[in-house]
Image (tube, grey):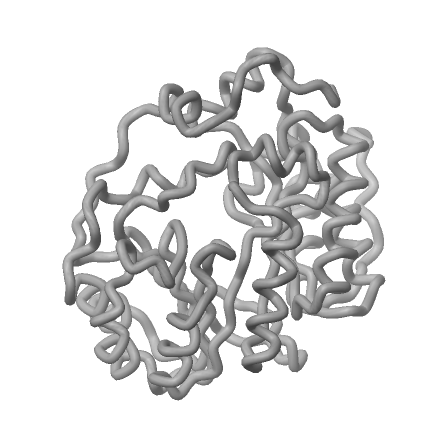
């Protein structure tokens, strides 16, 4: 399946495959919840996660479905602080916070710079705050926000893959040099970073998907990333469904995800997490899915490798 289509994969093609967006309220987050995560210091902690509603990311990545919960206009001033305040009022207090915004936190269309002070006042009781950003937006605004807040700032960046041809066809408009420069900038300003890595993006076979996910983990730690999250790629955004229908994409198996996480943990370079969102869809076996989910969850929390799951589906 390592063959690229004749079509030009660009904004126009990706947008033409989309369905409708969900209706969102710019003054309320579209989701908020608590989950447990192992920190870089080795403790297992409750983490507050707020999925902010804001304007759509200007980068239309091939595999992304986060646009479904975004608006078409710049986020109104005071909307993001209102969302954070609303979510925190509904959740128990924790020491760790993730602010995900379906794009880049430092994109001023998504998070108005004038709101940084109000955001800081709302989150200053946390120990750490993790935000996400495309390398294009990792600049002085990162430092402006860092200097306003009391929590330690962490930034997650989508590396996706170190397979350069695949990366180019993801329409992310980012090179590996862009990624490494962003990590260097963050590290030079004492801001730890996390890499998002895709398991089996389009145009790769299952075996190739596993191989290149492992290579991407190697690269991320080599350039100075603190931790990695591996995300199994799924259809559902229109463009991915079109590629699947034409045999350019198949979603990976949960066993492949286990393999990649095991590899990352064995490196002992930093935490390597599996994204378990909607994880059931990556297994076709009802006999072992619960055991495999529990095994991945154990690896996430303890960064240790339990015995493998034995099942007839293997």
Q: Position of residue 271 (x, y in %)?
A: 69, 67
Point 80% across, 59% down: residue: 306
Query: In which quadrant of the rendered view does residue 20 lie?
Result: top left
Residue 66, x across and y down, in percent: 39, 42
Q: Position of residue 245 (x, y in %)?
A: 55, 13
Q: What residue do we see at 17% from left, 62% from top?
A: 79
Say whether residue 305 is left or right of residue 237.
Answer: right
Q: Quadrant of the N terminus?
A: top right
Front in this rendered view, residue 300 or 159: 159
Residue 308, image x, y percentages: 83, 49
Q: Quadrant of residue 73?
A: top left
Residue 33 makes an appearance in the image = no
Q: Is residue 273 above or below residue 90?
A: above
Q: How many numbered callouts?
A: 0
Relative side of 24 to 65, left or right: left
Q: Write the residue at 25% across / 79% down.
A: 117
Identity of the residue drawn at 75% across and 26% down: 205
In the shown orientation, is residue 28 left or right of residue 154? left
Q: Is residue 92 visible?
A: yes
Q: Is residue 94 above or below residue 139?
A: below
> If the image is split into quadrants, where does the C terminus sit?
top right
């Amino acid at each position: 399946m390592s063959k690229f289509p004749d079509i030009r994969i660009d904004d126009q093609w990706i947008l033409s495959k989309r369905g409708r967006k969900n209706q969102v309220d710019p003054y309320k987050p579209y989701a908020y919840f608590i989950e447990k995560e192992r920190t870089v210091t080795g403790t297992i902690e409750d983490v507050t996660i707020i999925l902010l509603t804001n304007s759509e990311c200007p980068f239309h990545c091939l595999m992304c479905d986060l646009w479904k919960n975004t608006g078409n206009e710049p986020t109104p001033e005071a909307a993001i602080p209102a969302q954070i305040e609303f979510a925190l009022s509904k959740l128990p207090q924790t020491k760790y916070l993730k602010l995900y915004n379906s794009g880049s936190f430092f994109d001023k269309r998504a998070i108005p710079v004038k709101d940084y002070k109000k955001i800081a006042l709302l989150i200053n009781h946390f120990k750490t705050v993790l935000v996400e950003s495309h390398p294009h937006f990792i600049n002085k605004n990162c430092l402006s926000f860092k200097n306003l807040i009391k929590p330690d700032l962490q930034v997650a960046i989508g590396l996706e893959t170190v397979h350069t041809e695949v990366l180019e066809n993801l329409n992310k408009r980012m090179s590996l040099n862009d990624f490494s420069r962003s990590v260097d900038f963050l590290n030079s300003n004492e801001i730890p970073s996390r890499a998002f890595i895709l398991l089996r993006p389009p145009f790769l076979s299952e075996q190739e998907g596993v191989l290149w996910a492992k290579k991407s983990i190697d690269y991320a730690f080599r350039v100075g990333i603190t931790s990695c999250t591996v995300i199994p790629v799924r259809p559902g955004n229109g463009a991915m469904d079109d590629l699947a229908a034409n045999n350019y994409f198949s979603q990976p198996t949960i066993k492949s995800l286990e393999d990649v996480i095991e590899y990352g943990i064995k490196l002992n370079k930093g935490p390597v997490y599996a994204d378990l969102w909607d994880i059931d869809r990556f297994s076709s076996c009802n006999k072992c899915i619960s055991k495999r989910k529990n095994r991945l969850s154990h690896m996430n929390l303890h960064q240790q490798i339990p015995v493998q799951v034995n099942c007839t589906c293997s």
